[in-house]
Image (cartoon, rainbow, N blue to C red):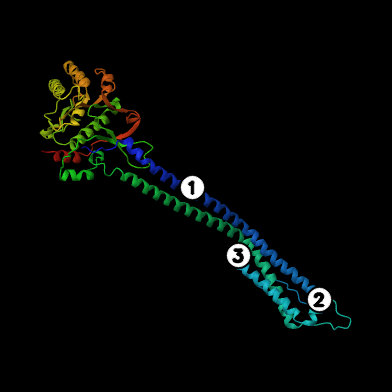
Amino acid sequence: MTQIIPDTMQLVASLRPFQDEIEQAQADYTAFVAELDKNRTVKRIDADNLRLDFITLQKQVQSLAEDLTDLRDDLDDLGKLPAVGTVANSLTFSLPEWHAHIDKLKSDFDALKTLIRADEAIAKYLDNGGRRGIFSRKPDLDDTLITQFTAFDQSLVDALAGLSTFETDQLPALIEQTKTGVDADYQAQITHAETDMQAKIDAIHARANALFDDLGAVAREWKYAEWESFIRKPTRPTTFPEIIRLGKYLGDDTQGASVPMLIPFQTDKHLIILADTDQFAKAQALLQSIIMRLLVTVPSETAKFTLIDTTENVLPFANRLPKSFGVGNLLRDADEINDGLQAALHHIRQYSQDHLGIVYKTLTAYNAQAKIFAPYQFICVADLSNGFNPKAQERLTTLIERGSKAGVLLLAVVDKANRSLDLSALMRESVVISADSTGFSVGDMRFEPDSLTDKALLGSLLAGLKD
């Protein structure tokens, strides 16, 4: 029983659930960035509000100064309190330190008022609104109280001067530095979030790519390392390939995976590459890749190959292939091509007579139940129908119309400008690969074609095919 390998359309369909994960990762990133933007705006506003915070500190000190002036006025009748003239201490604090310093000034003012009211006579004097009782003696301010009052007054003068200097020299830089820090932290978190999102997406892509790891040789790229196991110890497959790789799928629905361009290998259809002239050389390179892939993936005795190349440049490996593939010398001139096509027509008549009829319409249908597999015949043509004389053209027409049912299949590159072929009949009986100015495609699926450019790999594969 043959292994069924999915084609590219099925592979892409299997990738769709990964898109949900990718979209979720992107949505999480978008939501995180939106929250970051919101927090950044708030923090930048908070930076601008540092000025309001500072103004509040200034007002607190000014309020203390006004309260101290009122207290001085209340005490002025009890003894002349000396006024503070100039700044005695140049204060330099950070904004948090200013908060702590002004909290201490408030505490010191409360302590000063407590000290003053500790004198019962002064307390009564103050409670009477600064008036002495008719028989009371005027209380005195002692030296300790005057010293502490003056010291506190000096601390307020110093604080107001220090705050003024801070407002001029430090506050603008602090606000700008705070905003810069907010922006730097924002950018760092954005970068981390982007890296985290990309890591998640890369992991999703890796799991998506892993879906193709077990597709086997039929789906592998032509990379030397991936074919070393075949080269070291060739092992012929036991099942006929139902899929053929053409290259790398270029659709935008791959979810980042490297999806092989696989198409069903229809053994009741010819396979042609219909190419514009400017894409012809690339189309021939793809044909070479397809033929070599078949050579290394079809089981023994299941296929015979006839190679036709009038230039001898596209299919130069004919003479190096094992006899089990049925390959003789490369067919180059008109007589050789005639003989090769005549042999193909004989094969069509023979298998049509022996295997095909009412029950089995195609050789593929027959092989599906046959105990003895009837080999397919692949007619590989580097440039259909260059070098074909009228007789060969006639035989080619018969092969196109009747060959696919009998398992005689054309694998060929065809120039769209070729006027010696009935392209409509050929395309009707074939799986068509298109090669034009937009690139390569099968139907509406675009792909990057494979090409066996590594001569070392090609030589090693040919060596591995020896009987």
- Which x, y percent locates residue 430? 26, 25
Indicate which disc residue 125 carries: none
Q: Is residue 400 left or right of residue 46?
A: left
Q: Which residue in the structure is indicated by mark 1? A: 30
Q: State which mark lies toward you, 2 or 3.
A: 2
* Mark 1 crowdedness (10 Å alpha carbons): few <14, some 14-19, many ≥20: some
Spatial separation of the CA atoms under disc 2 and disc 3: 38 Å
Q: Which residue in the structure is indicated by mark 3? A: 95
Which sits in the foreground, 273 or 105? 273
Which quarter of the rendered picture does the C terminus lie within?
top left
| Residue type at the position of mark 1 | Thr
Q: In the current view of this chain or complex, which residue is farthest to the right? A: 134
Q: Is residue 240 left or right of residue 29?
A: left
- Which x, y percent locates residue 109? 70, 74
Quarter of the figure with residue 220: top left
Q: Which residue in the structure is indicated by mark 2? A: 127
Spatial separation of the CA atoms under disc 1 and disc 3: 36 Å
Q: Secondary structure at mark 2?
A: helix
| Residue type at the position of mark 3 | Leu
Q: In the current view of this chain or complex, which residue is farthest to the front? A: 359
In the rendered structure, which disc, 1 or 3, sits on the residue that comes first in sequence? 1
In the rendered structure, which disc, 1 or 2, sits on the residue that comes first in sequence? 1
Total marks drawn?
3
Q: Secondary structure at mark 1?
A: helix
| Residue type at the position of mark 2 | Asp
In the rendered structure, which disc, 2 or 3, sits on the residue that comes first in sequence? 3
Q: Is residue 357 left or right of residue 278?
A: left
Q: State which mark lies toward you, 1 or 3.
A: 1
- Which x, y percent locates residue 247? 28, 36
